[in-house]
Each structure stands twice: as structure tokens, then as C-alpha cells.
Amino acid sequence: NVFELYSLKFKTNLELMLQQKTSRLETTITTETGLVGKAAVAANQVDPVEAQEVTSSKQDTPILGATYHKRWYVPKSEDWGDLVDSFDKIRSGVEIGGPLLESARMALRRFKDKAILNGFYGVNRVGENGDQTVTFKPGNIIADASTGLTLAKLMTIRERLINSDFEPGEDKITVVVSGRESSALLDDIKYTSSDFGHPVLDNGKLKSFMGFDFVEMSEKRFQYANADTLRQIPVYTKKALALGIWADIEGWIEKRVDKKGNPQIYAKGTWGATRLDEEQCFIINCKV
């Protein structure tokens, strides 16, 4: 019937558009799909241990006593929906680029980015059964409240990453910024000057610098501190933050008999995010 036809078209076109353009943050982190249950293990981790020197041919085999940890995803569902009062709107709305399809795509992309940032900033579940919690490491917050984003702050993070055995070039480092932080970088001569051999923008986007990739987002997406006078800018490596997906974005259209037979358009997704490596997640406090 006509509802099934448009529902299939909406579902197919929504999936196609989302394949072409994912959420802004999804490609910057580790992702895992096909999860089930109330929670799922994101990683079985082993604390770093040092190898020991062999000093004799008959030396005992070492038992170094590595410590094991589990990190957990906890899913939340997000949805979007609207009641449409005519089939004309459905016909145009579910086409590629149509207003209904575009509205659903943008809303669910934002929902997914929100889940990723919640996993970054928030309390994470750990332990054998996921019944313990860990908060963001206070020592990884660059707390200078007198300035916005500066290259000096980024250099501090780069130094700490290298000291944590991070190998530059081995993994992506992402900095999520608002327009204010972008402007601060563009005001810094070390970032913009051709003397440093660095092109400023690539198709209107901030270029990578010192191994950092920049993702620009609305200031509404960030966490704030100190009575909203400090915007907390996330910095993380790709392996340090993960998204677990129970059900990726899907959509359909159905007839609402309680609304005079008008069509309801609906889309949803279920996912959860967590930090995987506390040593490679940082917050930069930036003056608003």
C-alpha cells in the first residue's frame, strides 16, 4: 500500500544520506556495531607492564601480575518524529534533499554527536559487571581560565600525550571547537603565517596543525564550567573514545488512525559512548 511504499522510500533514502554524511564526530572515534542487552563491554583492558631483563639462562619465567579492567557502553535511544497533514508533503519530503528527510538526518546526527560528547565528559561505567564508575581525570583538564584556545594549550597536551607513550602519527588527535575557538586560532600568527608553512583553511575548514585535527560545532553542544564562563573543549585520540551502536538510525512512515489517518514520519537510533583511555582524553578550559 501507499504507506509501505513511502515508508520504504524514507528508510532507504535516510540510510543513504547518513552513509554519505555521518555525524561530525563519529569518524573521529572508534565504533562498534551489533550490540545487544542493557549494557555491553567496550573493552577488556590491561594496565601497562614493563618487560624485565633476562639475566641468566635458568631464570624463572616472569609472572608480572597485570591488572585487568572492563569498560562498558550503556545505551540510550533517541528518536525524531512528525505528523504530516498531506501526502503531497510526504511525496516531496522523503526524496533525497527533501525537507522531512533532511530534518530527520540533521536531528539524528546531532543526537549521535550528543551521545559521543556525553560519553567523553560524563561518568563512565567500569568493573567486572559495570557496577563501578570513573569520572573524567582532573589532571587532564587544562585549567587556565584567562584565555581562549591557544597553541600553548595544545602544545601542553601534545607533550603529555608523548609522555604517556603516545606515538605521533600513529593515531588521530581530534580537537572539537566552537566558532570562538576557531577565531582564536585564526588570530594566532603561528597558525596563520605562511612563514610556518601552514595553509590556514581547506574548503573553509581549519587545517590540521601539530598533529591535531579540528572539528567545528555549535557552542550549544559543549559542556561549561564556572557558572558558564568556561567552555570545555574536548581533545582525544581516536582509540581513546568509542561509540557502541545497538541499532543505528532507521526510519519509517505509518498511518495514525487516531489522527484522522494522517501519516506519522518517525526515526530513531540506540547507542552509547565511553572513554577507553583516560590518559588520552583532555579538556581545555576556554574563556567564553
Image (tube, helix red, strand yellow):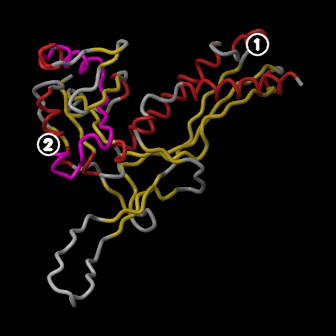
Q: Is residue 58 above or below residue 194?
A: below
Give the residue at x 11% y 30%: 152
Q: Is residue 172 above or below residue 56?
A: above
Q: Would you say 149 lies left or right of 33 here?
A: left
The disc placed on residue 91 is 1
Residue 142: percent from the left, percent from the top? Answer: 16, 38
Give the residue at x 19% y 33%: 285
Residue 19: percent from the left, percent from the top? Answer: 58, 29
SS class, disc 2: helix
Residue 141: percent from the left, percent from the top? Answer: 19, 42
| First to last magenta residue range | 159-188
SS class, disc 1: helix
Residue 182: percent from the left, percent from the top? Answer: 26, 19
Q: Would you say 178 lies left or right of 33 here?
A: left
Quarter holding residue 213? top left
What amino acid is at disc 1?
Answer: Arg
Q: Report, in whole angstroms, how far the alpha carbon at label 1 lies from the one at label 2.
A: 55 Å
Quarter holding residue 99? top right
